[in-house]
Amino acid sequence: MITPERAGWRPMQYGHRRAADIADPIVEPLWEGIRVLAHAVDGTVRLIDEDGRDVTDRFADVAAALGPSIAAGSAVVEGILTTQATESGEGAKIVAVQTPTAGQMIGQMFMGKSGERALGGSGATRGRPATSDVVAVVAVDLLEVDGTEMLDVPLLERRRILESVVVEGELVRRGIFVRPPISSYLISWPALGFTHMAYKAQNGTYRPGATADDWTIAQIPRR
């Protein structure tokens, strides 16, 4: 059961600073899809979108897959419901690493076979036509685990703990991130269909529903 306080949580919003002004950032490819907070309690998951709507029934396959993938009694995970994670590279496994090579990025980003299409959302414009209608959830942040709020824990530590809390599967992935320099990814990410990237201060905290002055979105430059 979602506590009343956490029921009011919403994904933190991106600010409008220049990427160059974000101190000590981590950088992520920006997934297209629907941002949600996944509230997991004893293997049962409710998916709440940015507008506070419960979309669990709409994405029942994802919720059912995420429940047993949470290695904790309870957790609140920010994720993106997206078909991008199941496009091309069928059979490859997405992994969360801090400094992968460009070749590893291409080989590890995608997998999947069955599901439904995610419509709309706050991600970037598609860089190519969709090749999958299979929806997966890509976990990108951790707000609570086993009753302990993580909001004041630095982002890099939240991401480290997330890796031990969320177990990957066909419909459950952990978002990858890198640290600057990112020049090699400016080639590999567009090849995978990404057009934008997110900069987030690695020491930043999480304020549900607020606009972050240390998060921003940047377009991946055309090479």
Image (spheres, rainbow, N blue to C red):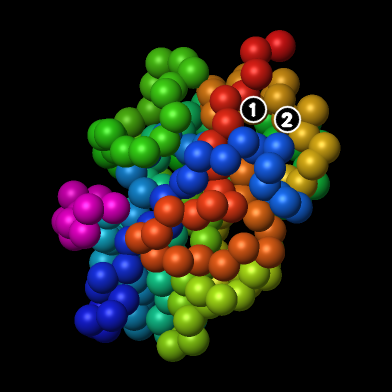
At x 72%, y 51%, the residue is 23
Location of residue 8 in the rendering, given as x and y in whole percent from the top left corner = 26, 70
In the displayed structure image, the side of residue 54 where residue 112 appears, left or right: right
Query: Which amino acid lies under the numbered mark 1 shown in the image of this protein?
Result: Trp
User: Label 2 crowding class (10 Å Cα cut-off): few <14, some 14-19, many 20+?
Assistant: many
User: Label 1 crowding class (10 Å Cα cut-off): few <14, some 14-19, many 20+?
Assistant: many
Q: Main secondary structure of the magenta part?
A: loop
Point out the image quarter for the C terminus: top right
Residue most extreme to the bottom: 147
Q: Is residue 46 above or below residue 80?
A: below
Tag on residue 185?
2
Query: Which amino acid lies under the numbered mark 2 shown in the image of this protein?
Result: Tyr
At x 71%, y 25%, the residue is 186
Q: Is residue 82 visible?
A: yes
Q: CA distance from mark 1 to mark 2?
A: 5 Å
Location of residue 169 in the rendering, given as x and y in whole percent from the top left corner = 50, 55
- Viewer-nearest residue: 128 or 25: 25
Q: Is residue 80 above or below residue 203?
A: above
- Viewer-nearest residue: 128 or 172: 128
Tag on residue 28?
none
In the displayed structure image, the side of residue 118 where residue 103 appears, left or right: right
In the figure, residue 191 lies in which quadrant?
top right
Q: Are marks 1 and 2 in contact (CB under 8 Å)?
A: yes
Point out the image quarter for the N terminus: bottom left
Q: Is residue 57 magenta?
A: yes
In the figure, residue 125 lies in which quadrant?
top left
Tag on residue 189?
1
Location of residue 38 in the rendering, given as x and y in whole percent from the top left corner = 35, 64
Q: Which residues are magenta?
A: 50-59
Secondary structure beneath dot 1 equals: helix
Location of residue 124 in the rendering, given as x and y in whole percent from the top left corner = 44, 29
